[in-house]
Every structure is written in C-alpha cells, then in structure tokens.
Image (tube, helix red, strand yellow):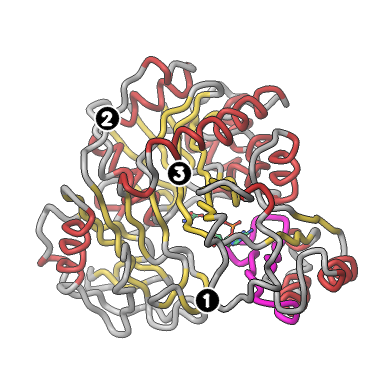
Amino acid sequence: MNTLVIGSGGREHAICGAFYRSKRVLKIYCASGNAGIAEIAECVNIEPENIEELLKFAKNNAVDLTFVGGETALSLGIVDKFGAQGLRIIGPNMSASKLEASKSFAKDFMFRHNIPTAKYRSVNSTREALEISQSGEFGGEESPVVVKADGLASGKGVVVAENRAEAVGAINQLHNLAGKSAAKKIILEECLFGREVSLLMFADGENFALMPPARDHKRIGEGDTGPNTGGMGTITDSTLLSAAQTEQIINEIIKPTLKGCADEGFPFRGILFLGLMMVDAVSGQRSGVSSKENSEPPSAAANSQLQPMLLEYNVRFGDPETQSILVRLKTDIVEICDAILAGTLDKLPISWHEGSSATIVLASKGYPEKPQTGAVIHGLEKLQNDISIFHAGTSKNENEEFVTSAGRVLGVTSTADNLQEALDKAYKAVKNISWDGMQYRRDIGK
Ligand code: AMP
Ligand code: GLY
C-alpha cells in the first residue's frame, strides 16, 4: 500500500521508519519531510496547513493510509476533510483535537469529567489575568504560578513563573503574542511539583493500547535549567510508572477521558498523549519555595502519596518521545492503524521490545533563541547499525552533504536491556557526530 506521513521533524522520521519496517507498505510519501526522511520516503513539498493540496495529492497518488504527525493539520480538521472523501487517515477529528488546540477547552473538559488536574482560571483579558495574579488566589508574592496562552503556540505558550512579579511579566509577554489567536485567552494555573511522565496510547474511539511510558527533557540546559525547547532528549523505561500507578492513571484519567470524548460526541481515534505530573503530596514542594507560602497542598494531591495529575493532552505523537517509543514497537504499525480505524484495538495484541531506550537530541548553535543553520554535519557514516538516527532539521548542500537546517537537528536513539546501557550506547554514538556549534545535554535520563 501507499502511505502519506504529514510533517517534517524527527517524530515524522520515526513514523516513516515504522512504515518502512512494515511488510505491507510499498511506498512512503512524506509531506514535507527532510533530508534524512528522503532516504526512506519520497518527500513532497506540501506544508501541513495546506489541506486542500494534501487531499489532492492523496487522491492523485492512490494513498491508502495517511498518518498525521503534528497538531497543526489536526486542529485545521484534516481528518474530517479526508474522511468526508472516504480517505483513510489516522488522527482525531477537529472537535477532538481541541483537547490540545485550546487549553481552556481541555481544562474545562478535565473538570467536567473529574479528571485530576491543577486548579485554574481562564480569562479573556490581560487586565483580568493581572487582577487574579494580584488577588492571592494562587498564593502570595513569592508563590509560583503557571501562566498559559490558550491556543497552539509551538511550546512557547507556557511560563512557569517563580513568583508574582514573574507572573506579571509572563502575562504581558503572552499578551504580546496578541496578534496570534494563541493569546486571546490566558490561563492561570496552580503550580504542581513532582516528576513529569509522558504516557501515550493508541485509541480507537473506545479501546486503547498503552505505549511504554516516556520522559522528555524540555529545558536547554543540564539540570533542567534555561529556556524551554521542543525537547532535548527522551527515555522510555518501565520504572517511570509502577503497575499500580498505571492502573490509577487508567481509572482516573484514561477511561474518563475516552468516555468523556465519546459522550460529548467526538470519540477519540488516533494517538492520545497525556502530559502527567506525578505529584508527591508529602514532599511535593520545591526546595527554595518557603513552606509558609506554599502551605496549601496542591488540591487533589492532598493526603495521597503519589497522585497522577494531568497537565495537558496532546492529540498526536510527541517529539522526541516518538523516536524513543517507536524503536521498541514490534507489531506492524499498519496492523495498528487498521485496528484504530476498525475499532478493534482490544483484539490486537501489540508487542514491544523489552528494556529501555534513549534519544539524545543534537541541536544547532544558538538554539533555542537564534539557531544558526547551514553547518556541515560530520561523522554520520561512522555510526553502527544498532543506533537509529532521526533527522529533525537537516538538508543537503550542493556537495550532497547533510547540513543543519533548524534548531533541533538530529536525534540519536538506542535501545538496550536497561536504561543505563541505552544511555551509554547513545552517548557513545553521539561522540562520532559533530558540526560547528553542536550542542546537547549530557544528563538525559539521569
Ligand atoms: P504544557 O504545554 O501544558 O505541557 O506545559 C509545558 C510544561 O510546563 C510542562 O511540561 C510542565 O513542565 C510545565 N507545566 C505546565 N503546567 C504546569 C503546572 N500546572 N504546574 C507545574 N508545571 C507545569
Ligand atoms: N515532547 C512534547 C511534545 O511533543 O509536545
């Protein structure tokens, strides 16, 4: 069959890789892809926003199955439009995509369905946001508070403010995005402390199948310092969640979410990504925050030991979680797509390679503020084939050499029996690769 993958990053390289391993795929198209993806797929120069062109392409090229990588096309209703023409496509429809496209919609949904999450206020103006931040509702002058823009903002719409002064700065900063719809509404949220886990699943509207739990590393600097990025590395490891915690997440978050979607008329089909905070209610206060200021325990977390709280939904695969997850997938991805579309995920056993995986992201000089591009990448030919390289931002120069073309450039992924081995393997491979100004975190998975 012919497949079309939509997107151009490391995530889409990993998705194309899974289709490449499928026994049932003859031809992979990727819109718009990158220089690494071009080695296993035919790249087509159509952007994810251009749904009419994608539709035309799929029809003219006998595409049997389309897989949407990112949120942009989903929030624009690509699934509704392909579906209306009888084309098979994996992803949630436009209504279900609002779980990611509008943070206030998602928070209201979580409250309607009693899903544990941080308490919040959603307001329509900077003035109201400033008033609430001054009111003491989210704590005193020195209490942290989270400020979010409502809409899609490519990871730039969330500020975890350490205190009230920073919150005021963040509100004004998000207001400056005002031309963009992302900042029309502002959300103020209780700040939770704990350990973050990404839990992804395949969903067919009713049934779901969990993927191995993953952890992203969002800050640019080691020890989780500096500005947020698109993600500097991920691991998958079974110890990220115990069986009891997984059970609790299924009962308190996943089942109510899938039932809520179905009851509200938008059964969720596709990939659902839970951004979770495992809140330690006893020691759940960050050092440096005085216990006086923080004497209110985080709402639902009170008196329980490790309470899973939902920070956010994403309605798609994560980047770079996908790179670490899909290298462990044994089942043919086409079988899974068929089951998602047929509503038969409960009948399909999905198997994963045992052990752990790690992805180290290699980024350009100046990322995330001002990434410099055009540097020639050295050393890719030295890599052993037990390492996967996922291209995120590469192109080729006139000498047919790979060059950097964006902030995040490559993901170096390995699998092993345990996390330490996976990390050692990935970091050893990283040592072979270089370009002018290449940067990466040396503490992924630590
Ligand atoms: P989101 O886009 O909602 O995932 O937010 C991006 C990041 O901000 C998350 O991965 C967390 O690190 C942080 N964050 C979001 N909401 C909260 C919260 N209520 N408390 C603490 N950290 C948060
Ligand atoms: N890695 C987080 C995301 O894809 O949103």
Q: Is residue 410 visible?
A: no
What is the quadrant of the N terminus in the image? top left
For the point 61% across and 75% down, which residue is it? 289
Question: Crowdedness of circle 2 by 10 Å Cα count: few (<14), some, many (20+)?
Answer: few
Sequence-wise, the earlier of marks 1 and 3 is: 3
At which x and y percent is residue 134?
A: 85, 73
Q: Nearer the viewer, residue 382 or 126?
A: 126
Residue hosting label 1: 227
Q: Nearer the viewer, residue 163 or 215?
A: 163
Instruction: Measure how far apart labels 2 and 3 are at the Cα level.
Output: 16 Å
Question: Crowdedness of circle 1 by 10 Å Cα count: few (<14), some, many (20+)?
Answer: some
Q: Is residue 136 left or right of residue 20?
A: right
At which x and y percent is residue 377?
A: 24, 74
Residue hosting label 3: 199
Q: Which mark is residue 351?
A: 2
Instruction: Measure how far apart labels 1 and 2 are at the Cα level.
Output: 37 Å
**Span colored in magenta:** 145-166
Residue 78 occupies quadrant: top right
Sequence-wise, the earlier of marks 2 and 3 is: 3
The answer to whether 43 is drawn above or below residue 140 in the figure is above
Residue 74 within the segment the image draws in magenta: no
